Amino acid sequence: MKVEELAAQLISFPTEMPPGNEEECAAYLRDYFRDLDIKRCEIEIHRFAEKRANLIVRIGPRGRAGLLFSGHIDVVPAGDPNMWSAPAFEPRIREGRLYGRGAADMKGGVAALVKAIETFKNRELKRGIIFIATAGEERGFDGLKALIRDGKLKDGDALYGVIGEPTELRAVRAHRGGAIFKITSHGRSAHSSMPDLGINAIENAAHFIVELIGLRERLGEIKDPDLGSTVLSTTVIEGGIKENVIPESCQVVVDCRIIPAHSSEYIRSRLEELALRIRERLPTLQLTIEEVLSYDPLNTPRAHPFVKLCEEITGQPSETAPYGTEGPLYQRLNISTVVLGPGSVKQAHIPNEYVEIKQLHQAQSIYEELIRQICL
């Protein structure tokens, strides 16, 4: 089976997040590894919820592994089927590209990681390899968090980590952290013909949203040499129940991409401070601020030996990225991690998503060279 054929098999599993449904895909990869009949290989399905599962495979000598290869098997929802030229979970190859939901983000990368390991299935390793296929990356990293919580992956389990997210085969050494806040504006309902009898939760939320623009500008005054500034955006607003009812509730979602100089706690404190300042001129403003999720920045130093090795193998300088990955969770476990994989993030989360088949083969070759240099 070629790498594009394995990727196509993975795409055919509709692992949309939400709801997840990753267990069947994880079981397929489990069986794939079993069929390889690799000596000194431990394979485990880690089920953490109904139809939700990770896969963890340990190959070679025990003790600290040389490499951890990781990729997520959930995908974002396919969306409107009319926007796709063919069904999203019926993979197809056309003009040197593999199309389907998850082709770039990131079942193509998962397939390349697996095929690289397969190349060395009959070789004696000096250092072990850990392969992890995670669930729930697209919604708070809940699969990997469960894996760590349940002790399946521990501090220092590997020297180096590679996440096969789409980077167009360039090593990404750093990216911003992030936090998502749900902010609820509380009002009082009334008939829309008598608005003074109520408190309009949507209008009050609007005051807060406008002020967020100024907060974003203030946060932007602090620059990180690699990652730029913290970015804050209003991404969702929901409120109201009927056209002739003053809304008593309105929910606003604020997405933050955070540089190391800041933290989710810092951003929350600025949001609370902003609400207090608005309330001085708008006493009816009542907000509840809830952190939905947060994750750290990834910050593997440019001069780190593993970054240098990845640059040497790819022939390209390392980069930084604006998006987030599971990398910081591995970083917390003292596993020096880079993001490096086939495909472009520009293809992620869009209709007719694709990955270049040439890049799948190039990625496999890069991962094979990493194994050769670190684990043999």
Image (cartoon, grey):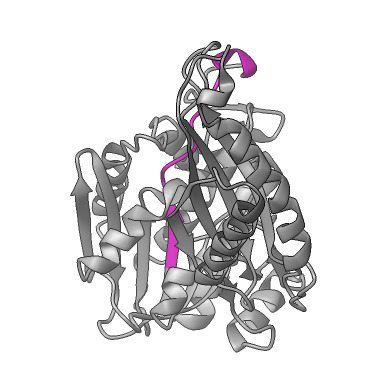
Residue 230 drawn at (x, y percent)? 69, 65
Q: Name the one closer to the observer, 210 or 281.
A: 281
Residue under the point 22% across and 71% down: 40
Magenta stretch bounds: 69-83
Please tell me whether residue 366 is drawn above or below residue 246 in the rendered image: below
Residue 19 in the figure: left or right of residue 285: left
Residue 318 in the figure: left or right of residue 61: right
340 in magenta:
no
- The quadrant where residue 226 appears: bottom right
- The quadrant where residue 323 appears: bottom right
Residue 360 drawn at (x, y percent)? 60, 49
Residue 3 drawn at (x, y percent)? 51, 46
Please tell me whether residue 148 is drawn above or below residue 29 in the rendered image: below
Q: Tell me how many marks there are.
A: 0
Q: Name the one closer to the observer, 80 or 355.
A: 80
Please tell me whether residue 90 is drawn above or below residue 148 in the rendered image: above
Residue under the point 37% across and 85% down: 126
For the C terminus, which image quadrant?
bottom left
Residue 76 in the figure: left or right of residue 62: right
